[in-house]
Image: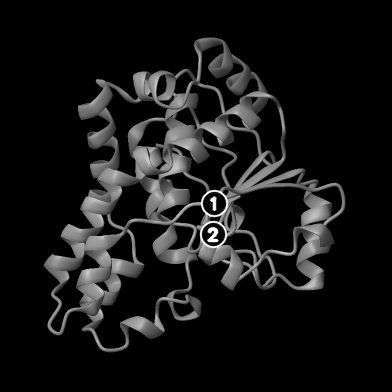
Amino acid sequence: METVGTLERVLPLEGGRNFRDLGGYLTQDGRRLRWGRLYRSGSMAALTEAAYVRLAELGVRVVCDLRTTSERRSHPFDWRKAPNLSYWARDYDLSFGDLRAVIASDLPTAEQAQAAMVTAYCELPFEQAPAFGELFRRLAAGETPLVFNCSAGKDRTGIAAALILRALGVPEATIVEDYLLSNLAYDRAGSGIAARLAHVPPEVTEAILGVDHRYIRAALAAIEAAHGSVERYLEERLGVSEEALERLKAQLLE
C-alpha cells in the first residue's frame, strides 16, 4: 500500500487542530484523490490572522462544521474573517451518554472507556446522518476546496472521512490508516476535554482522546448491519444517488 509522509498530509495552521489534506490516496481502480480539494480538521475556533490568510491561500470555499450547538457557542469559528467563505452547521446536541458516564465515574477503566467509545461510534453514523448528507451534497456539487471539522477532528470527522474515502473507492486499509493518523496529528493537551479527564488514569484518557482501529471498524460494521453495505447506507440514509457518487468521483479523483 502506498502511503504519503505525515508531514505532507498534516498541514500547519496557526491555532488549528488536526488539519489535514485528504489528497493523494489511491483508489482500488488506480485513481488518486486530488490534493488541495478536501481537508479534515478539528476546531478552528482559535485560528490566528495568519491562519485565515492561509485558508485564503488554499482557496477554501466551504466549511462544514460538525460540532454541536453548545460547542460552537462556547468556541465560535469566526468564518467571516476568511474571504469568500461559505459556512454550514446545524443545531443539535451530541448523545455520548455512555462516555460521559465513564468520565464522571470514580474508578473508570480503559476497558470501560473503550467500550463507551465503540458504542458511540456505532451511533454516530446515524446521529450525524443529516450532516454527512449535507457534506456529500456539497462535494458532489463541486463546492471545493472544502473543510469539514468537529472539535478534535477525529470522531465525527473521522467517520465522515471514512465514508468519503469509501465512496471514492479507497481500500479499507488506507481508510483505517488515515483515521489512525489522528494519534499523531491531534494535540490532546490542547483539547477542551483534557482538563475534565485530569482525575482519570492515563490509559483511560488515551482511550477517549486517542483513536483505535476498533472504533472506526465498529462504525462501519454498524452501518453494514443496518443497511447491508456502506453504499446502501449512502443511498438510503444520506440520499446519495449513484449519479451523485459519479459527480463526487469526477470532482475529487484524477
SS label for mark 1: loop
* Spot occupied by residue 241 in the image (x, y as percentages of width and height): 51, 14
**Viewport quadrant of the N terminus:** top left
What's the residue type where badge 1 is placed? Asp
* Whether residue 254 is visible: no
Proximity of marks 2 and 1: CB atoms separated by less than 8 Å: yes
Counting residues from the N terminus, which is met first, the one under dot 2 or under dot 1?
2
* Whether residue 14 is visible: yes
In whole angstroms, how far apart are the C-alphas of marks 2 and 1? Answer: 5 Å
Foreground pick, 171 / 120: 120
Residue to which mark 2 is pinned: 69
* Spot occupied by residue 35 in the image (x, y as percentages of width and height): 66, 39
| Residue ID at (40%, 50%) | 179
Q: Based on the displayed image, in which of its 4 quarters is residue 123 positioned?
A: top left
What's the residue type where badge 2 is placed? Thr
How crowded pointer 2 is (Cα within 10 Å; few <14, some 14-19, many 20+) is rated as: some
